[in-house]
Image (spheres, helix red, strand yellow):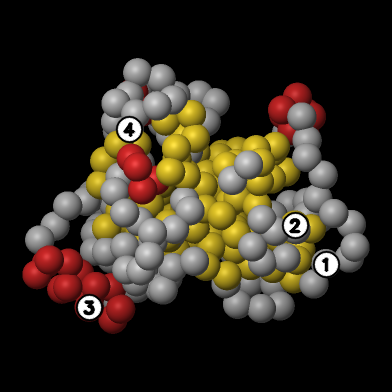
Amino acid sequence: MPCQIRIPMAVAMIALTFYSASRAAAKDSEALCEGGAVTNTDGTFETAYWWQYGGVVSPDYGAFAERFEADGQLCQIGLQYTGIGVLEIGGPLDLYVWADESNIPGSVLYFRTNVFVGNVPIWPVIGEHYEDVTLILCVDSPYWIGFWGNWPNQSAELLLAVDLTGEPGQAMTKVAPGQSFPEGWQPVNDVFGPTHALGISIKLADCSPVPARPMSWGRVKSLYAP
C-alpha cells in the first residue's frame, strides 16, 4: 500500500523550520566527486512517501525513481530519508540507474543490492546517505535514479523524503499487482498526489567519452553473483 505523512499546514511549517536548522548528516561515504550534489529538490522536504506490505513485491515493485538530465560520470547516489520510529540502521535497499525509455525507467544501467543507511531519524528530521557507484558509469541525459526497499510484505524500514514546493515533477513509482492503481511504472503525482521532487540526489565527475550501456537483467545479476 502507498503511504505518506499527512500533517496540518501549521505543523508542516514547524517541521520545515526544524529541518532547516537541524538536518541529520548521515553521510557514510566521503565525497569523491568534484562538484556538489545534483538534486531536483529545493533542499526542503514537506512530507515522506513509502510502500509497504503488499505494495512491495520482488524484484522491484514499490520502487521510486527520479529523472535526471545532468551528464557526467556518476560516482555517488544519495537518498534523503526519515522515519516514524528510531532505527540505528535502515534497509536493505537496492539502488538502480535506469536508461530513459519513452519517459519512464527502462533498461538497467547499474544495480547494487543490500545497501543500508545509518541513523534513521524521526520525522521531521531528515537523514542523508551517499553510496559510491562501484563501476565507471558515464550517463547521458535523460536517465533515472532510484531504489527499491527490500522488505516485501513487511512494514517500511525508512521513508523517502519528498519536496512538495514547486511545479509537479516527473518522479515515478512502480506499482505492484493488486493495488488501487494500474500496475507498473506510474507517475508519483497520480499515486501520491502533486509532487515536486523525491529525496534522491547524485554526485558527478568529469567523464571520459565512454557512454553507459544498457545491461540485460541476467548480466546485471551476474555482476553480483557470489
Residue 96, image x, y percentages: 61, 44
| Label 3 close to label 2 by CB (< 8 Å) | no
Residue 44, image x, y percentages: 34, 71
For residue 207, the mark is 1
Tell me which residue sits at (69%, 38%) in the image.
108
Q: Nearer the viewer, mark 2 or mark 4?
A: 2
Left or right, 221 with reference to 85? right
Q: CA distance from mark 2 to mark 1?
A: 9 Å
For residue 139, the mark is 2
Tell me which residue sits at (47%, 51%) in the image.
171
Tell me which residue sits at (90%, 63%) in the image.
209
Q: CA distance from mark 4 to mark 1?
A: 37 Å
Q: Circle 3 sits in a helix, a strand or a loop, which is it?
A: helix
Structural crowding at the residue carrying mark 4, measured as other residues with C-alpha within 10 Å and reported as few (<14), some (14–19) or many (≥20): many
Tell me which residue sits at (17%, 52%) in the image.
6
Structural crowding at the residue carrying mark 2, measured as other residues with C-alpha within 10 Å and reported as few (<14), some (14–19) or many (≥20): many
For residue 52, the mark is 4
Which sits earlier in the primary sequence, circle 2 or circle 1? Answer: 2
Which sits earlier in the primary sequence, circle 3 or circle 4? Answer: 3
Q: CA distance from mark 2 to mark 4?
A: 31 Å
Which sits earlier in the primary sequence, circle 2 or circle 4? Answer: 4
Please identify the quarter of the rendering in which residue 110 is found.
top right
Which quadrant, please, contains the N terminus? top left
Residue 157, image x, y percentages: 35, 41
Say what amino acid the circle numbered 2 marks: Val
| Label 2 close to label 1 by CB (< 8 Å) | yes
Say what amino acid the circle numbered 4 marks: Gln
Question: Which residue in the protein does label 3 denote?
Answer: 17
Say what amino acid the circle numbered 3 marks: Thr
Q: Residue furthest bottom?
A: 21
